[in-house]
Image (cartoon, helix red, strand yellow):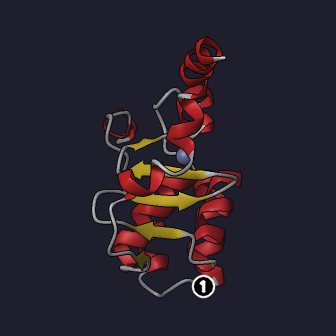
Amino acid sequence: MKEKEERKESFSLPPEVLEAAGKGISYELYKTLLLSFGKRGEKAFNYLKEDRVKKYLDFFVVVGEEEYVVEENFCTCNDFQINLKGKAPCAHVIALRLSKFLEHYREFDLYYVDYMGEGKVKGRYKKVRGKKQKKLK
Ligand SMILES: [Zn+2]
């Protein structure tokens, strides 16, 4: 039937999920998410319920075990990159889609790239820095 269309790169939320979302963050939404996406749907529901979707000036971020930069069809988490190989939405992408649909997110008047510089990004460059520091000793 329509299954071929759903294999496109851009993910879409099933109509029953959108319909349930139209009624708010309710048990019905939880149920349809769980049926459509299993554990990922359940997680997405909790991200919404717990206000863990944040909108920065440059990016949307979902706070899971870590903070993930999330776009409509992309997420920086391991689940999306490794398990799903970018072919299906992870919990964060589902949460982002829903939060946009519901306009339910926390807005920050900040650029996330600046904020990242304080944490994760620095961590990734640690090795390079370490080498330089050794030289100095
Ligand atoms: Zn993700």
Q: Does 112 appear above or below 19?
A: above
x and y percentages locating residue 135 in the rendered image? 59, 12
x and y percentages locating residue 104 in the rendered image? 43, 80
Give the image quarter of residue 127. top right
| Viewport quadrant of the N terminus | top left
Residue 105 appears left or right of 32: left
Kindly state the secondary structure of the residue where label 1 is placed: loop
Q: Which residue lies under the disc numbered 1?
A: 26
Q: Residue shown at 44%/61% (left/top)?
A: 96
User: Nearest the camera: 51 or 66?
Assistant: 66
Indicate the amino acid at tag 1. Ser
Residue 132 appears left or right of 112: right
Q: Residue shown at 35%/42% (left/top)?
A: 2
User: Nearest the camera: 59 or 48?
Assistant: 59
Give the image quarter of residue 106. bottom left
x and y percentages locating residue 46 in the rendered image? 66, 70
Q: Does 9 appear above or below 19?
A: above
Q: Residue shown at 53%/60% (left/top)?
A: 62
Circle 1 packing at 10 Å, graded few (<14), some (14-19), many (20+), is few
Mark yes or no: residue 13 visible. no
x and y percentages locating residue 134 in the rendered image? 65, 15
| Viewport quadrant of the C terminus | top right
Mark yes or no: residue 23 visible. yes
